[in-house]
Image (tube, rainbow, N blue to C red):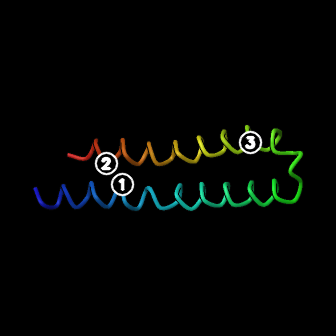
Amino acid sequence: MENVMLAKALAIGIGSIGPAFGISFIGAKAMEAIGRNPESAGKIFLPMIIACAFAEAVAIYALIIALMIK
Protein backbone atom coordinates (compact mmCIF):
# COMPACT_ATOMS: atom_id res chain seq x y z
CA MET A 1 0.00 0.00 0.00
CA GLU A 2 2.76 2.42 0.90
CA ASN A 3 4.64 1.62 -2.31
CA VAL A 4 1.55 2.40 -4.37
CA MET A 5 1.09 5.76 -2.70
CA LEU A 6 4.78 6.56 -3.24
CA ALA A 7 4.50 5.61 -6.91
CA LYS A 8 1.45 7.84 -7.34
CA ALA A 9 3.16 10.75 -5.61
CA LEU A 10 6.29 10.37 -7.73
CA ALA A 11 4.28 10.06 -10.95
CA ILE A 12 2.38 13.29 -10.42
CA GLY A 13 5.33 15.10 -8.82
CA ILE A 14 7.86 14.31 -11.52
CA GLY A 15 5.23 14.60 -14.24
CA SER A 16 4.40 18.15 -13.16
CA ILE A 17 7.94 19.53 -13.18
CA GLY A 18 8.23 19.81 -16.97
CA PRO A 19 4.90 21.55 -17.55
CA ALA A 20 5.60 23.95 -14.67
CA PHE A 21 8.89 25.03 -16.22
CA GLY A 22 7.29 25.14 -19.67
CA ILE A 23 4.42 27.37 -18.61
CA SER A 24 6.75 29.71 -16.72
CA PHE A 25 9.05 29.95 -19.75
CA ILE A 26 6.10 30.64 -22.07
CA GLY A 27 4.78 33.35 -19.77
CA ALA A 28 8.19 34.96 -19.32
CA LYS A 29 8.88 35.11 -23.04
CA ALA A 30 5.39 36.44 -23.80
CA MET A 31 5.77 39.20 -21.22
CA GLU A 32 9.21 40.03 -22.62
CA ALA A 33 7.79 40.24 -26.14
CA ILE A 34 4.88 42.42 -25.00
CA GLY A 35 7.29 44.62 -23.07
CA ARG A 36 9.38 45.16 -26.19
CA ASN A 37 6.37 45.81 -28.42
CA PRO A 38 3.19 46.60 -26.47
CA GLU A 39 1.12 46.91 -29.64
CA SER A 40 1.60 43.19 -30.33
CA ALA A 41 -0.12 42.08 -27.12
CA GLY A 42 -3.24 40.97 -28.98
CA LYS A 43 -1.23 38.83 -31.40
CA ILE A 44 0.88 37.27 -28.64
CA PHE A 45 -1.87 36.53 -26.10
CA LEU A 46 -3.80 33.80 -27.95
CA PRO A 47 -0.74 31.71 -28.98
CA MET A 48 0.55 32.05 -25.41
CA ILE A 49 -2.72 30.70 -23.98
CA ILE A 50 -2.76 27.83 -26.49
CA ALA A 51 0.85 26.90 -25.69
CA CYS A 52 0.07 26.97 -21.97
CA ALA A 53 -2.89 24.66 -22.56
CA PHE A 54 -0.69 22.18 -24.42
CA ALA A 55 1.88 22.27 -21.62
CA GLU A 56 -0.86 21.78 -19.04
CA ALA A 57 -2.12 18.75 -20.97
CA VAL A 58 1.15 16.98 -20.17
CA ALA A 59 0.51 17.52 -16.45
CA ILE A 60 -3.00 16.13 -16.88
CA TYR A 61 -1.54 13.03 -18.54
CA ALA A 62 0.74 12.59 -15.51
CA LEU A 63 -2.30 12.88 -13.23
CA ILE A 64 -4.15 10.24 -15.23
CA ILE A 65 -1.17 7.89 -15.03
CA ALA A 66 -0.95 8.49 -11.28
CA LEU A 67 -4.63 7.66 -10.89
CA MET A 68 -4.23 4.47 -12.96
CA ILE A 69 -1.47 3.06 -10.75
CA LYS A 70 -2.92 0.31 -8.58
- The Cα atoms of the two marked residues, 3 and 1, are separated by 28 Å
Q: Which of marks 3 and 1 is in front?
A: 3
Q: In this view, does 23 lie to the left or right of 68?
A: right
Q: Earlier in the sequence, mark 2 or mark 1?
A: 1
Tell whether 61 sits left or right of 11: right
Q: Where is residue 24 in the image (x, y as percent from the top left)?
A: 60, 59
Query: Whole-percent x and y of residue 1?
Result: 10, 55
Disc 1 residue crowd, few under 14, some 14–19, many 20+, Cα 10 Å: some
Nearer the observer: mark 2 or 3; the answer is 3
Toward the left, the furthest residue is 1
For image coordinates 44% across by 56% down, the residue present is 16
The residue labelled by disc 2 is 66
Label 2, label 3: how far apart the Cα atoms are: 32 Å
> Badge 3: how crowded within 10 Å, few (<14), some, or many (20+)?
some
Residue 54 to residue 36: above or below: above
Would you name the residue on which mark 1 appears? 12
CB atoms at circles 2 and 1 under 8 Å apart?
yes
Tags 2 and 3 touching, CB below 8 Å: no
Amino acid found under the numbered disc labelled 1: Ile
Badge 2: how crowded within 10 Å, few (<14), some, or many (20+)?
many
Tell me which label, 3 or 1, sits earlier in the chain. Answer: 1
Q: Looking at numbered disc 3 in the image, what kind of residue is underneath it?
A: Phe
Residue 45 - label: 3
